[in-house]
Image (spheres, rainbow, N blue to C red):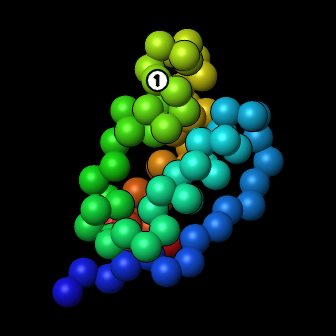
Amino acid sequence: RNPRIKKVSFTGNGCAISIAAASMLTQRIKGKDVEWVGKIKGDNVLEMLGGKDKFPPARLKCAFLGLEAVKKLTKGVY
């Protein structure tokens, strides 16, 4: 049986894009199993934020910051 994400939150400082992406990501992964969460891609995050065409390449790092943290946790890297 695959464990589920029971609680999730974040604390951080950053630009509006990174905060919005992290907030939306936490809502999206709550209650999901870890395997499912590990399969989330950058494109999924961009869809949550309104689509790929909304962000210049220089701001993608901001949008993916929360996802990078989640990926590390799903792989057991603390």
Q: Work out whether residue 9 or residue 69 is closer to the camera in this orientation and state it.
A: 9
Q: Position of residue 73 (x, y in %)?
A: 44, 67
- Residue at (54, 33) in percent of width and height: 49
Instruction: Point out residue 27 in the picture as x, y percentages from the top left corner.
Output: 55, 59
- Tell me what residue is drawn at x 58 percent, y 49 percent: 24
Mark yes or no: residue 53 visible: yes
Residue type at mark 1: give it: Gly
Dot 1 crowding, Cα within 10 Å, few <14, some 14–19, many 20+: few
Q: Secondary structure at mark 1?
A: loop
- Depicted 37 relative to depicted 1: above or below: above
Q: Nearer the viewer, residue 68 or 55?
A: 55
Residue 42 visible, this angle: no
Screen quadrant of the N terminus: bottom left
Q: What is the x, y in percent for residue 31?
A: 43, 73
50 lies left or right of 77: right
Quarter holding residue 9:
bottom right
Q: Answer with the quarter of the image where residue 4 lies.
A: bottom left
User: Along the horizontal axis of the image, is 77 left or right of 19?
Assistant: left
Q: In this rendered view, identify the residue nearer to me: 49 or 78.
A: 49
> Residue at left 74%, top 61%?
11
Q: Position of residue 59 (x, y in %)?
A: 60, 22
In the rendered view, tell whether residue 16 sits above or below residue 37. above
Q: Residue reaching furthest bottom?
A: 1
Figure check: 44 above or below 8: above
- Residue holding disc 1: 51
Kindly give the residue lying farthest to the left in the view shown.
1
